[in-house]
Amino acid sequence: MVRNQCLVLILFSRSSARPVAISFFLKNAGIQTSSSRTKTSVERALQEQLPAEQVSSAGLIEQVDQLKRKTKKIEREFEEFKKQQREKYNKLREHIMLFSTGKSQSS
């Protein structure tokens, strides 16, 4: 029976019938649509909470974006720091090599 109702619904929804006729047909067929039935108290409560949840979600998305930007900045700074440390290490190593070769030549 449900399969037949779905088939009729698909065929009916593809026709050029007006929305009033469609909802009248669905009501007579025993199929409730979201607009033709009354919302439960839970549905109303959830509907009322939706805007606040959307705002909260948008705020969280913005925080995540800020954290991503901050992370990229810190990663760049860390790479620069590592580069500077390598340069300092190489200079120190050169000085040590020069000092040790100079010392061994004077011995």
Image: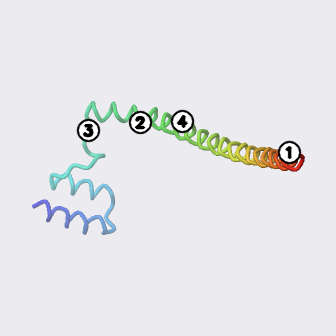
Q: Which label's residue is closer to the chain start, 2 or 3?
A: 3
Can you tell which mark lies on residue 59?
4
Q: Residue 49's image quarter?
A: top left
- Taking the spot 26% from the left edge, 49% from the top edge, the residue there is 33
Q: Amino acid at mark 2?
A: Leu
Q: Nearer the viewer, residue 38 or 46?
A: 46
State which tag comes first along the sequence, 2 or 1. Answer: 2
Residue at horizontal 37 percent and vertical 36 percent from the top: 47
Residue 16 percent location from the top left of the image: 34, 68
Which element is circle 2 on?
helix
Q: Could you give the CA–CA distance between mark 4 and mark 1, rounded to whole angstroms? A: 65 Å
Comparing labels 1 and 3, the label whose residue is closer to the camera? 1
Q: Give the label on residue 50, or none.
A: 2
- Residue type for callout 4: Gly
Q: How many residues crowd mark 4 within 10 Å: few (<14), some (14–19), many (20+)? A: few
Q: Quadrant of residue 71?
A: top right
Can you identify the residue that label 3 sits on?
Answer: 38
Q: Earlier in the sequence, mark 1 or mark 3?
A: 3
Q: Nearer the viewer, mark 2 or mark 1?
A: 1
The answer for how far apart the CA atoms under marks 4 and 2 are is 14 Å
Q: CA distance from mark 1 to mark 3?
A: 95 Å
Q: Which callout, 2 or 3, points to the residue nearer the camera?
A: 2
Q: Could you tell me if the residues under marks 3 and 4 are in contact, i.e. CB atoms within 8 Å?
A: no
Q: Amino acid at mark 1?
A: Lys
Q: Quadrant of residue 15?
A: bottom left
Earlier sequence position, callout 3 versus callout 4: 3
Amino acid type of the residue that numbered disc 3 sits on in the rendered structure: Thr
Q: Nearer the viewer, mark 3 or mark 4?
A: 4
Q: Are marks 2 and 1 in contact (CB under 8 Å)?
A: no
Give the CA separation, mark 2 to mark 1. 78 Å
Residue lying furthest left in this view? 1
